[in-house]
Amino acid sequence: MDTLINLMDGLASALTPQNLMWAFLGVLLGTAVGVLPGMGSAMAVALLLPVTFRFDPTSAFILFAGVYYGGMFGGATTSILLNTPGQASSIATTYEGHKMALNGRAAQALGTAVIGSFVASVIGTLVVALFAPVMVAFALNFGPGEYFALTVFSFVAVAAVVSGSVLRGVTSLLIGLAIGLVGIDAQSGAARFDFGSSSLMDGIDIVIVTVGLLALGEVLYIAARGKSAPNFAAIRTGRPWLGRKDLRRSWKPWLRGTALGSAFGPIPGSGAEIPTFLSLGLERRLAARRARRTGEEDEFGQGAIEGVAGPESANNSSAAGTMVPLLGLGLPTSATAAIMLAAFQQYGLQPGPVLFERNAELVWTLLASLLIGSVLLLVINLPFAPLWARLLKLPKPYLYAGITLFSVLAVYAINTSVTHLVMLLAVAVLGLVMRTFGVPVAPALIGVVLGPIAETEFRRALAASSGDPSILVGSGISIGLYALVLLAAALPLIAFLRRRRADARAVDVKEPVERP
């Protein structure tokens, strides 16, 4: 009851005209920067940090929270329409979202994304408000060994489930891990795979990889296909709202994605990428099982709405979860949370358990503003879904020229380096080759994002145990995650054996053995 009373007090404070204005401005600004590759909510909050120095702390953090939530959804817009994720957390949305757009269902994809974001944000924020102490205690159980097990689980789950083909999935994952190894080793300081170039010592930026593989790689692939490429001018933008069938297919993925994001959000280092890809893989597996049971067509790979609803819900609920370690422990779990921690220090506040006692009004007003930001996100973006979908009506040469210009400017803005543009072209050619031979892109992106994290946590674990590998399986969490790894690796084999058995039975029924 005390928690609910505090939350109600926070809502009363957040609903003042001034705080409502900051929440609206934050959501609007976050949505705008979310569509720009390489920008995202982290850079927007960083740019706002010196501007808000003289603000009241409560107003400043309401603005930051609005930017955070708005940026999470903004990345979905270009992911769906242009196959170009605004930030890494929107990568999983591209796979089914862009195919929905090509099938004339861009408005429905954007609609399920914004409603899923709203549902996940509200539920995730309420979970944070009601169960923050429990979630903090859970996050404290994760050490280097548990982090490594978590990344291994993510590798296997994505490679085995998302790709459909284990061999091609593992191949793509290895490509991503190889890209992630480029640069100076953080532990030893040794340069790896830099080919004598100083520009590669810092590694290949994730913006270059995502923009090159997804956006520019798609442009090259479309150009290589020539007249067989999809004609956007003939694409219908679809009905403006979700129909009953779309809602019926979306509400369960919304809840499943929310559960995944809420579970991973408080874990330091997990980020939003892991739950979004796990949600995509889960929805794909459930859709395949449902298709075998009912005989309906499995739409995954052709534009399944579940592949948008689940990842977008996981994305936004994980954003709410990051507030748990930030406010309860002073431990940021994302780039945006790290900048918000710097903002706390700028105002002379120290996040941690005492923050809930000394600055209770600030904390509960901030949590309440997340609920308000979720409502504003829905109100601002849902009516504009059909309008955004009309971007696909642009002539194909203009559209892809715009995507190319957009990609080049996003990469060049990182540090105004021509070498980065050369890297972008090389990664785009790699994306073209992967598409040509049917190698999925998703496992490669997971390898790039999580590969360095897995390596760092593995070496930290061995350093903490003086080289004893038993630390990697030294807790129930690690053992449970490795059990899930074995299960995820065995599922494709079990499914293959069941298909062979079913095919053999079908042959026996069609061709009965003749008796003498």
Image: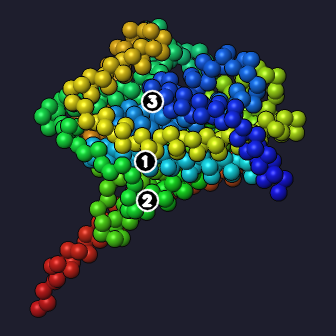
Q: Percent from the top left, x then y, of residue 396?
A: 21, 30
Q: Quadrant of the N terminus?
A: bottom right
Q: Which residue is mark 1?
A: 111
State whether residue 440 appears in this view.
no
Give the residue type at disc 3.
Val
SS class, disc 3:
loop
Q: Going from the N terminus, do you reach mark 3 or mark 1 first? A: 3
Q: Mark 3 or mark 1: which is in front?
A: 1
Q: Quadrant of residue 500?
A: bottom left
Residue at the image point whose x is 88% and y is 35% from the top:
358
Question: Is 148 placed left or right of 294 in the picture?
Answer: right
Marks 3 and 1 sit apart, C-alpha to C-alpha, by: 16 Å
Give the residue type at disc 1.
Gly
State whether residue 387 appears in this view.
yes
Give the residue type at disc 2.
Leu
The residue carrying pointer 3 sits among few (fewer than 14), some (14 to 19) or many (20 or more) residues within 10 Å by Cα, namely: many
Q: Percent from the top left, x then y, of residue 128?
A: 70, 47
Marks 1 and 2 sit apart, C-alpha to C-alpha, by: 10 Å
Q: Residue 193 has which mark?
A: none
The residue carrying pointer 2 sits among few (fewer than 14), some (14 to 19) or many (20 or more) residues within 10 Å by Cα, namely: some
Residue at the image point whose x is 58% and y is 45% from the top:
375
Question: Considering only vertical position in the picture, is 473 above or below 17?
Answer: below
SS class, disc 1:
helix
Residue extending farthest front:
17
Q: Residue 247 has which mark?
A: 2
In this view of the protein, which residue sits in the foreground, 21 or 471?
21
Q: Which residue is mark 3?
A: 35
Q: Percent from the top left, x then y, of residue 269?
A: 63, 35
Q: Going from the N terminus, do you reach mark 1 or mark 2 first? A: 1
Question: What scheme was used to colour the molecule?
Answer: rainbow
